[in-house]
Amino acid sequence: MEPLLNGSYQLSNNLVGQESFNHHLKTLKIGRVKEAFWHASSTYGSLGSDFFDTSNDKTSNKYTLKAVEKNSPVVTYQLDLYKKELEKSVKENALQHEKIRKTNFLNYGLIALFFMAILGLLFTLSRYKEQKRLNLTLQKKARLYLDQKTKTEKTAHAKSNFFNTICHELRTPLYGVIGLSAILLENNKEKGLQEDLKSLQFSADYLLALINNVLQINKMDADQIGNEQVDFNMRDLIDQLVTTFKYMLKQNKNVINVTLPHDMPFLLYGNPTRLSQILMNLIGNANKFTNNGIIDINVTTIKIDADQISLEFSVKDNGTGISQNKKEHIFEEFKQGDSLRYDYQGTGLGLPIVKRLLHLSGSDIRLESEIGKGSIFSFKLDYPITQRASPQNFTSHQAAVLNTTVLKGKKILIVEDNRINQMVTKKILEKEGALCTIAENGKEALNAVQSNVYHLILMDMNMPVMNGTEAARLIKRDHHVPIIALTASEIAEVRQNILDAGMDDIIIKPYDMDTFKKVILKNIQNHKIKQPTCSSA
């Protein structure tokens, strides 16, 4: 049977008994109903005419149903089929609408995603352009920064070289001033003249300390501070420091008391130069602000183990003291120069150097002070223990080191281009009985050792014609004579070059007279050489 729902006629509005039909049956087209009854008439014979009246109502141009009133089983059956078809059609229609709705929803979603993607792409493009612009700006700033950094480094390097050169040039004549004043003090016993010479020596020492402080600050700023660690004796170090302040203490009429712990090991391992700089600045500061007073240097043991000791150092004075509002500023560089008080001399570099050196050593400075009662500066340092007990012959060994009679008759070659330094060095050694020969440069020194055998050579580093490093290297090829470098430069700067040249030791100009003699004696005693066979250069 062809589908009943594919007709083209409309269902009459005058259907009889349409209240008993399903709501959806009312929408059936009349052509489809007639087709169904005609099909039933052909199937069941005359029954079809009983059920369906085909009379034409010309007025309404519509058909009516009779079989519905008789409630025929065939009609009921056919109506059930229509209802099933209708329900199926409704369901299919609903499914189709649902598919269309879902498809539309998906399309709308895809359209929304598309626009979001477009917006995201535009945003990303905008961000990319902005990021690129920022990167270009940063690159320009980075190049400017690097250029400025390079210029600053060049300026700092030039400044550092300038200070090093100036300090070197100042140290060299200072060596002559300090040496000559020491010689004159030993040779002249007249009381009035000695006071003048002591004042001259004090001024030279003060100028040397100032030069060393400026050089130290310059090296800290350039990050060129070394940390050379060696074995040293704490008692000797502090005794030497006190000795250097002998005249300064006398000038201010102060007294120094030193207290060391009884369990202080004989040898410690560390940086004695740095410790000396710290204590020298603290002692010098205490002496500067104290008159007719007492300066106490105390070293106490905090903790001691088998291989390490923790020490606390303190420098106490009963001088003017420091006010509370100045405690935070006294460790700033050149701060003392801003002070309105002119009765104390100084650059204000000592305490800033102390603070920075202690920071490099992993410690810090502590201050206790009260106006009119004095100040206490203290700090803590740890040192590995190299040798706990002192050797039994330690005293006699020290005495032998200080026995300058060993120098009597020893031939020493002085290689130095500065005439004043030649004279000072020669006078110091000849006073102890040494036989000295002068060479003004490295080439003359080479010629001298070809015809003479020397017990010791004192070699200046910076000379014309041939410098000390080259001369020492050539001499050491064929001779085993000890060579001591004389330099106004810092040890850290020249040590490696000196050791590479084969030299045995270093003396920094201007040097302490006792230290100068001790270094010479040590090297002569440690080298066994044959007796000189010639007496002149």
Image (spheres, grey):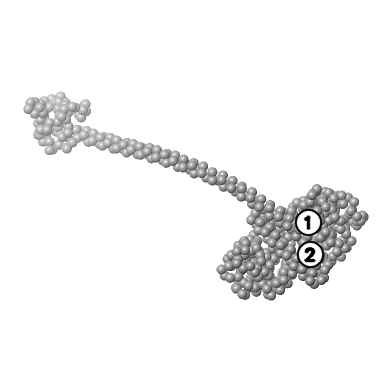
* Direction from residue 219 to residue 411 in the image, left or right: right
Label 1 vs 2, first from the N-terminus: 2
**Image coords of residue 102 (percent x, y):** 31, 38
Q: Give the structural element (helix, strand or loop) at label 2.
A: helix
Q: Quadrant of the N terminus?
A: top left
Q: Is residue 263 above or below residue 211?
A: below
Near-viewer residue (272 or 103): 272
Near-viewer residue (332 or 521): 332
Query: What amino acid type is highlighted by mark number 2?
Result: Ser
Near-viewer residue (383 or 8): 383
**Image coords of residue 518 (percent x, y):** 80, 63
Is residue 170 visible in this depiction of the protein?
yes
Say whether marks 1 and 2 touch (CB < 8 Å).
no
Is residue 268 visible in this depiction of the protein?
no
Residue drawn at (52%, 45%) of the image? 138
Residue density around tag 1, few if under 14, some if 14–19, many if 20 or more, within 10 Å: many
Near-viewer residue (171 or 256): 171
Query: What amino acid type is highlighted by mark number 1?
Result: Leu
Query: Mark 1 sits on what residue?
Result: 486
